[in-house]
Structures are given as C-alpha cells and as structure tokens.
Image: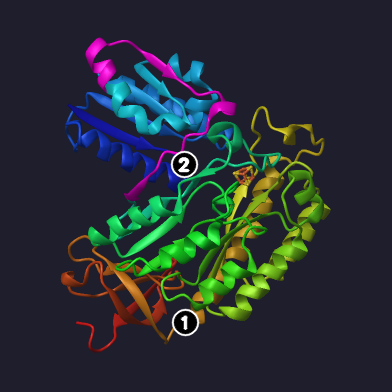
Amino acid sequence: MLCLYHTFGCKLNFAETSTIAEMLENRGIMRCGDGEIPDIILVNTCSVTGEADKKCRQTIRSFHRRYPDAGIVVTGCYAQLKPQEASALPGVVIVAGSDRKNSLPDYIERWIADNNAQCLITPLQQMTAFSPSCSRGDRTRYFLKVQDGCDYWCTYCTIPRARGRSRSASIEEIVAQAEDVARKGGKEIVITGVNIGDFGKGTDKGFIDLCRALDEVEGIERYRISSIEPNLLTDEIIDFVAQSKRFMPHFHIPLQSGSDEVLRLMRRHYDTALFRRKIERIRRVIPHAFIGVDLIVGARGETAQEFERSYAFVESLDISRLHVFPYSERPGTRALEIPHVVSQEDKHDRAARMIALSDARLADFTGRYIGTGRKVLLEHSAAGQPMGGFTDNYIRVSVDAPAHLDNHIVNVMLDEAVAGSETVSGHLLSGEE
Ligand code: SF4
C-alpha cells in the first residue's frame, strides 16, 4: 500500500505529518514516490484563514480527480472545525480531528478491512490528549512538539477551537525524544507548539525548566525556540538563552500590531510597552540575536491612524525581520463584532509598507555580519550547487563545501549578500575542509 501526503499550514502540521508517515511505514504503508499511484492520500489541513479552507477543499477535489480510486484521509484544523463539510468532499473516507492524528494508523487499517467511512472528532471540551511528534523537518533540523492547544482566545484566531486547550508532554518524555534525535545524528532541534511559553501549565514546571533540561542533552548542538508569546518570553528565558551554548540567539515573537488600541481589540495579553522591553532586553544581553516578529495588517479596528501608530512603533524597534500577514476574516470569531473593516486595497498597501520595512531591517541585520566569521550548520544541496545552512543567529548562508561536511557545524566567513535573495554567500574558514 502507498500513501501520498499533503500538508498545509504551520511547522507543527509538517512535523505531525512526518510522524504519521513514520507510524504508517511501521505498518507497511509506504510513502508514495514520484510517478506511483497512491492507495491512500492523507491531507493534513489548516484553517487559519478562509482562504486556507478553500485551498484544502480544492486540493482534495483535485486529488480525487487525479486518483479516483484512492481513499482520502483528512485531518488537522479544517477537519476539526468543519468535519461534515470535509466528509462530504469526493473521495474522502476518513475525517479525523486534531487530537486524533496519532490514531490514524488504526483508523486507516480499519478502513482497509471494512471499507466504511469514518468521521472521528473529539468535542473541544474533551480534547485533553497530547499527541507527541518529533520529526525531521528538512535535511538537518528536527521539529520537536512540546505543547499543543491554546487558552488565549485572541479575537481573530480559530486555533483554540481547532486544537483545544493548552496541554504539554512531560519534561522526561521530551528529553527522551531529544536523546533519540541525538542518537540518529540530529544536531539541531526546533522546539515547536501552538503556545510554547504556556508549556507545563497546571504543573510546577514551566518552559524555562524544559529549556534547562534540554540544554543537558548530549549530542544536540543547537536548539531554536519557535514562536513564543511576548508576555511568556520571560527575562529568565532571555538570560538563559544568553548564557547557553546550545540555545541559539534567535527569537520569533508575535507582535500582531504596534497599536495598543488594536492589541486591546485583539485581546492580546500585552501592550507595546511590554513588547519594547522584551526587544530591548534581548538586544542588551544578546546583541547579535536574530529577532523575527509576526505582524497582522488591516485587522478590524485598525484605522488609518492606528496603522500609522503601528508602523511608527515597529519602525522604532531594533528587530531583524517581519512576517507580515494581511488580516483575514474567520467565521465564528469575536473579531467580527468589531465594526471598523479595512478595505482590501488598504490591507494591500499596508502590507506592502510593512514588507518594505522588513526588507530594510533584514538587509541591515545581515549587513552587520558581512566580513565576520560565524558558525553554520551545513545542509547538503543538489549536485553542483553550493551548500546551504544557517548561522547561529539565523542568517541564511550559501557556501562551497565538500559533501562530507553535510550536517556539520563549520566556521564560515560571510562575504556578501546575494542579490535578489535573503542569502549571504560565504567561504569556509581555514581548517574546516
Ligand atoms: S495566542 Fe492567540 S493567536 Fe496564538 S494560537 Fe492562541 S489564540 Fe491564536
């Protein structure tokens, strides 16, 4: 039996798809290769915007047209939020909610045996199980899920309805997974979750305890903390990263708006003053840290004046890059009660201004390190192409290096920005060949 995988959305979804694929391979259902015909198609969906829902539906219909005999399995946030709609799509034989991903091998075996369609959704209030996931996301990095769900209920977001309440694995379980990655030769782990700063909620252990425990795992040379809410990024965590040799100087922090009024309408858990303090502390104790910031433009309530406030605030921060998302309406969210709606044209213009600001910040940040040597974890590339990789502080680098240095950390001199890309070209420092 062959299974074809298609994943939408966040890194967590990609990690979970890899975990499902491993579990299915252990039961003899192998990954479908190029040119092969799948018996099963697994679509791990996203529902972050109305557009995401549409893409999921289109993709499922197109798979069915192309492979009419394959059974289509739909899981993830769209499946959780719209199970009846997903079940009615052509070719769909299993719809499994967000907390059912690790049971998919059982559901698939049942379908193979009896050919009966299944729709398996846990009501939100009962969604308490934590499905572990640790997978090789790309050639060198592993994505380790430590937490799932969210209790914050920001007014524009459907994730708490799709993934349920905040819950985590134990520190012991996560350390065991990290040790397993080290045994497999993995060097870098990205710590992922929906709201990872909430790790351990309801227990006497928090995210900082998890970081300290992971820092002791022999063999793992790099950890990166994926997106963490600013109010949960404590000074203790920042100071810990500053002194750790394994936690990389790299933060990804959702701001969402630089206007206090819009933050209030979004029901975020901080204001711009707190956000500024976090950025300033990072810069004080880790001057070379990469700081990526998420930002939504054109949210309901973002008047022209509030956008200008937001722009001025972001412009005043010493950050490395913005991830700009035009606001998208989500049915069922409380944001729809906010009367001021931003036109598509204004959203587009605001996104363009923020993206231009982001490009300038990134060029400035990478420019500070041209002519300096930094450690890069090398990744094998296609034959004839230079190797790629990231510096400790998340600058993308391309470098000519022998193939045996794949998955090795080496010293690279950063030479110059590659025109039209976010990459810096470099060369190996002597002694690294
Ligand atoms: S913190 Fe807010 S935006 Fe992030 S997942 Fe939770 S509810 Fe959604």
Frontmost residue, 388 versus 112: 112
State how many labels appear. Answer: 2
Provide the residue designation for mark 2.
Answer: 9
Task: Determine the secondary structure under disc 1.
Answer: loop
Task: Determine the secondary structure under disc 2.
Answer: loop
User: Local crowd at mark 1 within 10 Å, few (<14), some, or many (≥20)?
Assistant: some
Q: Is residue 110 above or below residue 4?
A: above
Residues shaded magenta: 109-135
Q: What residue type is labelled 1?
A: Tyr
Frontmost residue, 271 versus 124: 124
Q: Give the quadrant of residue 431.
A: bottom left
Provide the residue designation for mark 1.
Answer: 369
Locate residue 329, reporting x and y percent.
66, 34
Q: In this view, does 360 lie above or below 20?
A: below
Q: What residue type is labelled 2?
A: Gly
Residue 89 in view (yes/no): no
Q: Is residue 132 magenta?
A: yes
Q: Does the magenta stretch include residue 373?
A: no
| Residue at image location 46% in from the left, 20% down from the top | 86
Q: In this view, does 132 lie above or below 112?
A: below
User: Local crowd at mark 2 within 10 Å, few (<14), some, or many (≥20)?
Assistant: some
Quarter of the figure that contains the C terminus: bottom left
Locate residue 82, reporting x and y percent.
53, 22
Q: In this view, does 80 lie above or below 90?
A: below
